[in-house]
Amino acid sequence: KQHYELNEEAENEHLQELALILEKTYYNVDVHPAESLDWFNVLVAQIIQQFRSEAWHRDNILHSLNDFIGRKSPDLPEYLDTIKITELDTGDDFPIFSNCRIQYSPNSGNKKLEAKIDIDLNDHLTLGVETKLLLNYPKPGIAALPINLVVSIVRFQACLTVSLTNAEEFASTSNGSSSENGMEGNSGYFLMFSFSPEYRMEFEIKSLIGSRSKLENIPKIGSVIEYQIKKWFVERCVEPRFQFVRLPSMWPRSKNTREEKPTEL
Amino acid sequence: KQHYELNEEAENEHLQELALILEKTYYNVDVHPAESLDWFNVLVAQIIQQFRSEAWHRDNILHSLNDFIGRKSPDLPEYLDTIKITELDTGDDFPIFSNCRIQYSPNSGNKKLEAKIDIDLNDHLTLGVETKLLLNYPKPGIAALPINLVVSIVRFQACLTVSLTNAEEFASTSNGSSSENGMEGNSGYFLMFSFSPEYRMEFEIKSLIGSRSKLENIPKIGSVIEYQIKKWFVERCVEPRFQFVRLPSMWPRSKNTREEKPTEL
């Protein structure tokens, strides 16, 4: 009984704490209108644009992708041969974040506040690859069909959940040196994000199979690719899974200080 | 002449790129109204509240501070003895960010977009210390006066400039392994932030000098403290100085994946 009361007391205290936070930040979760994030869209677009320019300018994105595919090849289904990139489009549009609102986390018993943000991307992110489809039936290696695939993500629409925490409960146990520089907030701040299961991810998938007698756009090929990409996504950042990323310290430090007009460049 | 034209061409291209970014994110810097950041205030407040709870709960904040002061003691003026903490208040209010708007960076020749955000903090962040004032005139060590100081920051108001970049131009040359995992965005995303020089930082400083015949609230003491704190701040993050912080990769990864209901805790 005593223990139960203490727990209840701690819980009430925590609920009051959150209520106070909302009061002191002038946020009423029941009536506060959703907020726009147009400024954020511009900053994100700028960084994506820089990424695109540099990726193409240095011509290193193909190498990076090939390396990446090489590292991941053990994970590929056994009916696929090695993969070569034939086409690449990093898109020319930008994600639009909007409609940001604070809510109590549904499964937290009102013990946690989180932001929900809509995200919408209308673009044409394309990856074209060349490989061979290895037919292992009726006996292994009976045929190797050349296959050309062009996969585009043309639409991504989702609701993103974001929160900040310094709770270590989800932190990986491997990098455990948490309080080396206590004063400077290095004990760990984390960004948690995930997408709600009702996300929408649309593809355009073109396939070409065979060298002489060609088969175009076999539906089965498209759905295998789509399944693999969505599986990758769902396993990492669709609720109840989420990404838990350690944020850098924002404490102002000499070593992070720069000047607007650098004398050396 | 040729070289000049090429530069001009590249410059025009860059200006067009930024114009396109603004068009595609539906942001007209001339007429777009400032946006609120109430959601952000709640998330930041929640993390500050967690920090405060843990700091006091574990009773480790005093140790951290003492360690910090110990490490910094060589930087103290020579007329101060070692410092002992007597009072500490981590405050109970939260910073309010507001009025966020995008502009071309004033000194960039319209080549960069940044966000300006107002920040206001009304709180009572207090640090009380005990030390000795060492009088070295007319001869060294002629007197050591006990001194009690209680310094509070009661108001901080400023305009924050924030931008995201993956430009390496300001990156420290020491950690130069930039393209180890090209595909996963590890090549470096940075948050740049600084405060405009018209910031307001108000203090309440109480001082007590001497053991028997006590001198209270000597103005000179207050201004020395205030000067040191503002100097620390200005040297790190007031324009033209800024903080340049490497952001972690947001690319979804297995090792950062967690589940909402952890089986181990």
Image (cartoon, coloured by chain):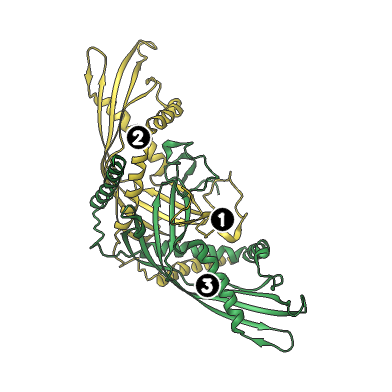
Chain colours: A green, B yellow
Q: Which mark is residue B186?
A: 1
Give the quadrant of residue B78: top left
In x, y percent, where is residue A196?
42, 66
Between A257 and A77, which is closer to the camera in this rendering? Answer: A77
Q: Which mark is residue A52?
A: none
Q: Is residue A24 left or right of residue A155?
A: left
Give the quadrant of residue A117: bottom left
Residue drawn at x 35%, y 34% is: B229
In x, y percent, where is residue A253?
45, 40
Name the amino acid, label 3: Gly
Subunit that carries the residue with mark 3: A
**Disc 2/disc 3 C-alpha distance (Å):** 47 Å
Residue B37 visible to an observer of this rendering? no
Secondary structure, mark 2, is helix
Q: Residues within 10 Å of mark 2 (few under 14, many from 20)?
A: few
Residue underneath mark 3: A91
Q: Are marks 3 and 1 on the same chain?
A: no
Q: Which mark is residue B229?
A: 2
Residue drawn at x 50%, y 58% is: B250
**Disc 3/disc 1 C-alpha distance (Å):** 20 Å
Secondary structure, mark 1, is loop
In x, y percent, where is residue B88?
31, 32
B174 lies above or below A98: above
Name the amino acid, label 2: Ile
Residue drawn at x 57%, y 59% is: B184
Q: Residues within 10 Å of mark 1 (few under 14, many from 20)?
A: some
Subunit that carries the residue with mark 2: B
